[in-house]
Amino acid sequence: MRTQLVLSAIIAALAAVFGASTAEKNGDPSAVIQDVERRLAETFRVRSVVERVIQSAPAGLSRDEFEALLTKELQTSGLDPKELLNGKTPQSPAWGTVKPIFDQLTWQNQQIATAKAMLHYDSSPDGVESYVWERRSKVAAEPWHFEEPSQFRRRRIGFATAGGAAGFVGGLGFLVLLAWLWKFFLARLREVSDAIRAK
């Protein structure tokens, strides 16, 4: 029985390691999300101001009036009015410079960040699948998935504990059954051997 307990403990340890390794993050720390939001806002800062002015400007404004309104809004936002492109919405940055901002996020949050960034583009950036582009508004409205490091550690410990317990019980049960089958086989073998000798 002692050997079976030792082997079961080894199995439990292996199962615990496996259980901990299967735990995946359900989200990202709030500080990481805030940093991504800040960097995205900074990247699209000028374009966001221009888009806001375009949406809120009264109808019938002349070009000069629109540029004056836009210049005032840019100055209020702490931006240089010289960044205006003849009154047109500035072009969004290359997708290759935007994507690294959220590459470190978990998969769910990457999808949300991708959608939020694509709202600032007039057409699908290179390398983005068409279905991702078409669903950008819906996905961008989804809430972020948060998980602090302490929460993830507790969940990994839970996975490891559950895996270890299951491994110990399952391993011990298997070894006990194996020992019983071995004894049963030996008993049957003796019976057959005794029968042969009796003949």
Image: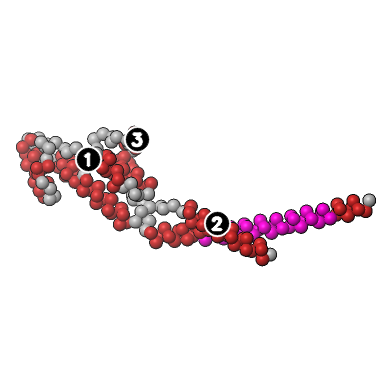
Q: How far apart are the two marked residues, 1 and 2, measured between alpha carbons? A: 48 Å
For disc 1, the neighbor class at 10 Å (few under 14, some 14 to 19, many from 20) is: some
Q: How far apart are the two marked residues, 2 and 3, measured between alpha carbons? A: 39 Å
Q: In the image, what residue occupies the spot 41% across and 58% down? A: 152
Q: Is residue 188 magenta?
A: yes
- Which residue is most to the right? 199
Q: Amino acid at mark 1?
A: Pro
Q: Which residue is mark 2?
A: 15
The numbered dot on residue 178 is none
Percent coordinates x, y for residue 72 in the rendering: 8, 46
Element at badge 1?
Answer: loop
Q: In the image, what residue occupies the spot 10% across and 36% down? A: 86
Bounds of the magenta span? 161-190
Element at badge 2?
Answer: helix
Q: Which residue is mark 1?
A: 93
Quadrant in which the N terminus appears: bottom right
For disc 3, the neighbor class at 10 Å (few under 14, some 14 to 19, many from 20) is: few
Q: Which residue is mark 3?
A: 129
Dot 1 or dot 2, earlier in sequence: 2
- Which residue is most to the front? 197
Number of the front mark, 2 or 3: 2
Percent coordinates x, y for residue 170 in the rendering: 62, 57
Whether residue 179 is situated above or below residue 48 in the rendered picture: below
